[in-house]
Amino acid sequence: MEAATASSPTRNETRGALRLGRSAIDWLLNVYAGLALIYLLVPIAVILVFSFNDPSGRFNFIWNHFSFAAWTDPFGVPGIGDALSKSVEIAALSTLGATILGTLTALALVRYEFRGRAPVNFFIFIPLATPEVVLGAALLSLFLNAGIATGFGTITIAHIMFNISFVIVTVRSRLIGFDRSLEEAAQDLGATPWETFRLVTLPLIMPGVIAAALLAFALSIDDFVITNFNSGSTITFPLFIWGAARVAVPPQIYVIASMIFLFTLAMMLLTVWQQRRAERMAATRPDEPEPARTPATAASG
Amino acid sequence: MPRALKKTGLPYLLLLPGLGWLLVFFAIPLLIMLLESLKTGAIDTGYTLTWEFANYSNALSDFNDQFLRSFEYAGLATLLAFAIGYPLAYVIAFRGGKYRHALLLAVIVPFFVTYLIRTLSWETILSDSSLVVDTLRTVGLVSEGGRVLDTTASVVAGITYNFLPFMILPLYASLERIDGRLLEAGYDLYGRRRDVFLRVTLPLSMPGVVAGTLLTFIPAAGDFINAELLGTPRQFMIGNVIQSRYLEVADYPTAAALSFLLMAFMLIIVVVWARIAGTEALLGTEGERR
């Protein structure tokens, strides 16, 4: 402290140098983050660009000619359309199953005190910490020993299995902040337990349930490892790509990937835009009192 | 009666379908696989349960290389993902401003493309006469006629890339939650920037660091897609062995033993991490009713 006051000019100088060093560090950090973003996005850009390629060989790895051919005939490769529709069917079915089972479990875990909750929490966590190869291999052991032929049904079973834990974790995080007095109010006003659930609980947890369902759908349609073990002769879209990767990679694969990508991106942007609009409308409505802001949200916003 | 049911039976009733499914299609299969791992025999004659514990030591010694390689690659990829992901998550959380959500969207954009196709895209990028490899040759980072594809580097790069969002998202979540007033307090107390970072920001982001490293390391150590598409048998990991022993060679006992060994190593790592981080942060059950 004393030294600092005694040598104030030099201190100012070092401060100046420090500030210069600081902005250099800031700048470097931003550049670094920018490079990291580019690393994340380059492979996606490559997919979009190479979907317009007219490859000279069987593998779409080297740029040859610009062409719309693959885009005008995206299902021109035999089997690719069937594989895609199988994937969508399985994803829809397994999402429905996993979302219902997972939501019920999450409700039980957050809303009730019961003996054995801690071990149940741990039991739900284990599938998340198990490598996919092990999940797939174990399930195949069951089907082999029980003499069950693998195919569409076993893939759906497998997808529900690995999705349940993800759904539980997602819905649970939404349920934790849940205000139980709303349910009590409904009950006091004479609602039956079922009415309370349908009219109060379900609408309130719906955003969490929808988020969980979207996650489950995405994980199901993307899964290769577990599906590969339990597919039998059924071919899903990822299995089709795996088979193709060894013999030929037609640009159609990149076209369908680009289509799924653009569709997902559009959906995402639409949701964000709608949310923004709803917020703006809520903000401009004059007679509605401002929702009470907690210090935390006020600080972050 | 309904009240009594609510008090005692309802939670168990709600748990029954979900936990039942996990019991039948997750827990019981693991038990069956445990028995499978102790069998001897051959695929034509069938496998019989002989409690052959030597399967484990044989599997470990036969595939020692692949085991070590799995943990080496997964560890490297986790470190790289951390080195790439932490600064990015930091910049988005503290400097993102109104672009924060757009930047986060850019982080999850790779997930909009199927895993296998992302990996094929890397095969395109790193293939022998691609733009990137040609440039690296010109610069001299890759020798003339040298390759990038089918090397350890390409496999680790692929793994790092594929699991990077799993690292960034938890890091961002924990950094974003940090109260800015704590950092200000640090500066007001004449903390230098490095001190504020090391003593305030980094410790407060530890839950994200733990979650991110686990979410990256676990799938990375079990992965076989990157080694298969971006590597050669010399880069094969334990996942490649399990998958080929099961599906191609039909050597079920060895495959089952390897699966259990992999799972055991994973659980040890998770438990060690849990001791460092606290199980509540790990299981995500902090806010539950006592």
Image (cartoon, coloured by chain):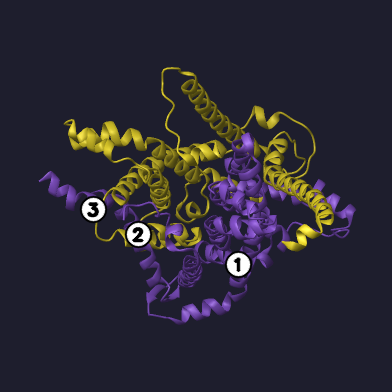
The crowding category of the residue bearing disc 1, from other C-alpha atoms within 10 Å (few below 14, some 14 to 19, many at least 20), is many
The dot on residue B70 is 1
Task: Identify residue type, mark 1.
Answer: Ser
Relative to A125, A48 lies left or right: right
Chain bearing mark 2: A
Q: The residue tagged with tag 1: helix, strand or loop?
A: helix
The crowding category of the residue bearing disc 2, from other C-alpha atoms within 10 Å (few below 14, some 14 to 19, many at least 20), is few
The residue nearer to you, when weighing B7 against A264, is: B7
Disc 1 with disc 2 on a shared chain: no
| Pointers 1 and 2 in contact (C-beta within 8 Å) | no
| Residue A87 visible in the picture | no
Against B252, is A57 above or below?
A: above
Q: The residue tagged with tag 2: helix, strand or loop?
A: loop
Q: Disc 1 or disc 3, which is closer to the eye?
A: 3
Q: x%, y% of residue A132?
A: 49, 58
| Residue A198 visible in the picture | yes
Q: Looking at this rendering, what residue extends furthest in the left direction? A: B1
Q: CA distance from mark 2 to mark 3?
A: 31 Å
The chain drawn in yellow is A
Circle 3 sits on which residue? Answer: B12
Chain bearing mark 3: B
Against B97, is A5 above or below?
A: below
The residue nearer to you, when weighing B48 against A51, is: A51
Against B51, is A156 above or below?
A: above
Circle 2 sits on which residue? Answer: A147
Q: x%, y% of residue B53?
A: 43, 81
Task: Identify residue type, mark 2.
Answer: Gly
